[in-house]
Amino acid sequence: MSTTFPRLLLAHAAQRPNAPALREKEYGIWQALSWSQLADLVRALAHGLAQAGLQRGQHIVVVGDNRPRLSAVMLAAQSLGAIPVPLYQDAVAAEFRFPINNADIAFAVVEDQEQVDKMLELREHCPQLSRIWFDDPRGLRHYNEPGLSSLDDLIASGREHLAQQPGFFDAEVQKGEGPDVAAMFFTSGTTGNPKGVVHTHNSLIDRAQAGARFDKLTSDEEVLAYLPPAWIGQNIFSYAQWIACGYIVNCPESASTVTIDLKEIGPTYYFAPPRIFEGLLTTVMIRMEDAGMIKKWLFHHFMNLARRVGPAKMDGKPVSGLDRLHYALGQLCIYGPLRNSLGLSRVRVAYTAGEAIGPDLFSFYRSIGINLKQLYGSTETAVFVCLQPDHEARADTVGVPIDGVEIKLAPSGEILVKSPGLLKEYYKNPEATAEVLTAEGWYHTGDAGFIDASGHLKIIDRAKDVGRIMGGANDGAMFAPKYVENKLKFFPFIKEAVAFGDKRERVCAFVNIDMEAVGNWAEKRNLPYAGYTDLAQKPEVYEMIRECIEKVNADLAQDELLAGSQISRFLVLHKELDADDGEMTRTRKVKRGFINERYQVLVDALYGGKSSQYIETQVKFEDGRTGMVAADLKIVDTKTFAPARRAA
Amino acid sequence: MSEQRSDQKASGKKIGEVILDVQNISLRFGGVKALTDISFNVREHEIRAIIGPNGAGKSSMLNCINGVYQPQEGAIAFKGQTFHHMNSRQVAEMGVARTFQNLALFKGMSVVDNIMTGRNLKMKSNIFQQALRFGAAQREESEQRLVVERIIDFLEIQPYRKTAVGKMPYGLQKRVDLGRALAMEPTVLLLDEPMAGMNVEEKQDMSRFILDVNDEFGTTIVLIEHDMGVVMDISDRVVVLDYGKKIGDGTPDEVRNNEDVISAYLGTTH
């Protein structure tokens, strides 16, 4: 069956005209937009865009938070056969320059003044960018820029055009076919320019439906759209599957009200990268620290029980009658209220992806009765490659290949995927396309991993990052930086870590402390500090981080393959690694090469045996200004452990 | 920020006629001369700052405009009408709202309720109807709530809608105070040290909101401020007071280069 997003929209509008499609909280009230109202809005927008000159096959940039009217613009563009290109709303203007020029984009629809300012700033470098529309007029009253107008104006002109050419929209929708390009997503790319990943209606809809079948999603699901729309994960959950299943997508009032909105909506289908789950857990733990004696005792008592019984219960394994009774009591006292205060009481299916999730974190959510699972996929595969079935969720695997997916391993250990959801190509980049897509239709994921005994896929690291230790006691041992870093990041005190070790004698690491967790920890110990940089360099903090690292080392020593990756020296960075400074991607993945270059002196100091190193770093603030952060960083040695030998 | 500001000016912010004219005001408390023969005017849609060292008479000046103090001499003309004596309710009814240096919010009440108190003058139903939420009162409350919600949206305090004001950080309380003043839909807004006690980030936020109020609603703003940087960045014209006397009046640049002002602030002698 070949269909397109606009056709699906029209089908929903015809079959369930009054069912809600989108909700947005505005002025304190959730305002719903029904499928027929949405179709009506899309129709007006499409007419407006057509009149403004948007042609079939042209690209249009969409930048902003999750706003109903921006989703409608994407649908309107697709109705005309044009290709929406969502970009990260928190990116600085210069980061938009490449995508806009790469696809020669002349039209942009943005959320508010902040984004309009960026677009206007770009005009100098992107002269073809002729029309800019904004959703929220606040602060834009006095802007007299050519080609800048509000979405309201666009809709109004669209309605006029609609009155003149009533059949135009439906005819345009009918011209669209499944194999047409539906959207383009720029991958953040840890190196070089971003690449435009081209997806067709077929690839996105097929994967959206396959995922929906796997988890038996219906049109009754409630989803909260709060992640950046430019990320394919968000697009799949709040756009592709939204239209494929016809469920309800809720847009939060603002980024700062997400936790409140989450509680009010109570989504049934939830998706978040591990850091969100981590943040939620940290808040709970901090609040529990401040709770009264009885509550604290109840919490710890039932959480111990949950750790023991919860996961087995979720996996459908037998649990003794007494435990079951005890757990039911916990359900009443702790688990139920906790789920409710997290806003996850109605969740039927929750996914985490994008990064590895800590085993403690993962089992915490499962043990209190939230069906949290992992999935594997990327922008290039339209997300769904592997999913974990309901009773087979594991912290260290990413699930089984779903409908339509074939997986094989290259001799190098790299995972290859064949699926109907694969990208069509990288935009205007045949070399890059040829690098990842073989003639037989296999996609090179770039991830190293293997399929375990139970048929689940297990990921070790990015294939290109997997290195070798050279020289020293562990000569030739495998070095998987991400694997090590993830183990470090599973500690709530460590926000980010960067491990070095490829072609070196031993492994050293940079650590970023988590300001909230470490700040709280310091307060509890009456440890005064002036700010991030000061706190990071406290000897007590170093001591605490050293303990964390030694635990990781002890853990790594158990692993035959990775025992050589134990960390022997580390330092705590004076500033948080930040996407604005180019140190991370917008999806918060560390850019190894860049960091290596930028902090060369620190790396040299780590390997040079120094005990401290002075560094000055330029930082970019959110408003585009820059400043300097300087500090004398201490460098500390850690204990490593002899690899465990398998008993013969 | 100053760059943006000049952009805005260039793009057509219209400063209108004189809306508030302070004529030869003198105010004494017994033998203490708080203000001596002060005259200045405020034009429609402008941001007018009153600055001066501690004890210069800034708050007294604002209190005179506001009708809290009755000056012994002089008059204040508002929209062409001259007043020698005004009480604060009259002033409020004419469309002048203010915020306070030491916040006068209801600490135990939520943000919504606090801002709602600013709608008091706009409500028509009587106290009994309001108490019983009877008849017109109920409909009216929904209408007023919408106005309040728009202000909450404008000031970006949605996450705190139902939080008791006393529990909020100081910078946000200041924002609620501004919200309550805005709830009166004033034509002139008097701000008494809107940035006192704030950190840099909070000051930037507050500056932005002041500019936005001025820009979006066309509200004329008279503000007292200590932070010279902020004043110079956001105001159109500045009055400088020292020991109850006016020692300077003009654009930020003019004031910055005024010898008397420099010596009042830096204590140099010429």
Image (spheres, coloured by chain):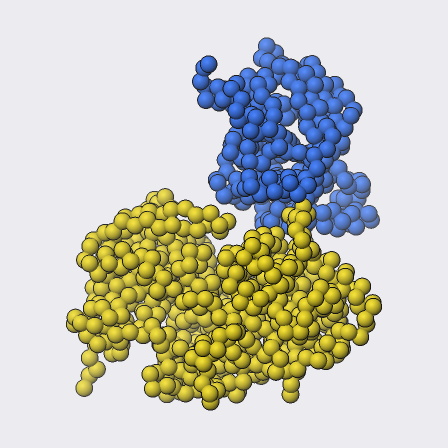
Chain A pictured colour: yellow
Where residue B74 appears, as percent x and y from the top left, is 70, 16
- Which residue reaches farthest left? A473
Observer-nearest of A97 and A555:
A97
Quadrant of the drawing holding the C terminus of chain A: bottom left
Instruction: Say which residue appears at 72% left-offset and 50% top-offset.
Output: B146
Instruction: Say which residue appears at 62% left-offset and 29% top-offset.
Output: B237
Instruction: Say which residue appears at 70% left-offset and 34% top-offset.
Output: B15
Where residue A597 appears, as percent x and y from the top left, is 32, 60
Instruction: Say which residue appears at 61% left-offset and 60% top-offset.
Output: A129
Image mark count: 0
In the displayed structure, does residue A536 sit left or right of residue A643?
right
Quadrant of the drawing holding the N terminus of chain A: bottom right
| Vertical side of B129 occupied by A198: above or below | below
| Vertical side of B113 occupied by A125: above or below | below
Residue A160 in view here: yes
Residue A250 in view here: no
- Which residue reaches farthest top? B31
Where residue B51 appears, as percent x and y from the top left, is 56, 26
Observer-nearest of A179 and A606:
A179
Observer-nearest of B114 and A192:
A192
Chain B pictured colour: blue
Observer-nearest of B221 and B270:
B270
| Vertical side of A12 occupied by A605: above or below | above
- Which residue reaches farthest bottom? A440
Quarter of the image for residue B235 reads top right
In the displayed structure, does residue A290 sit left or right of residue A63?
left
Where residue B260 appears, as percent x and y from the top left, is 52, 18
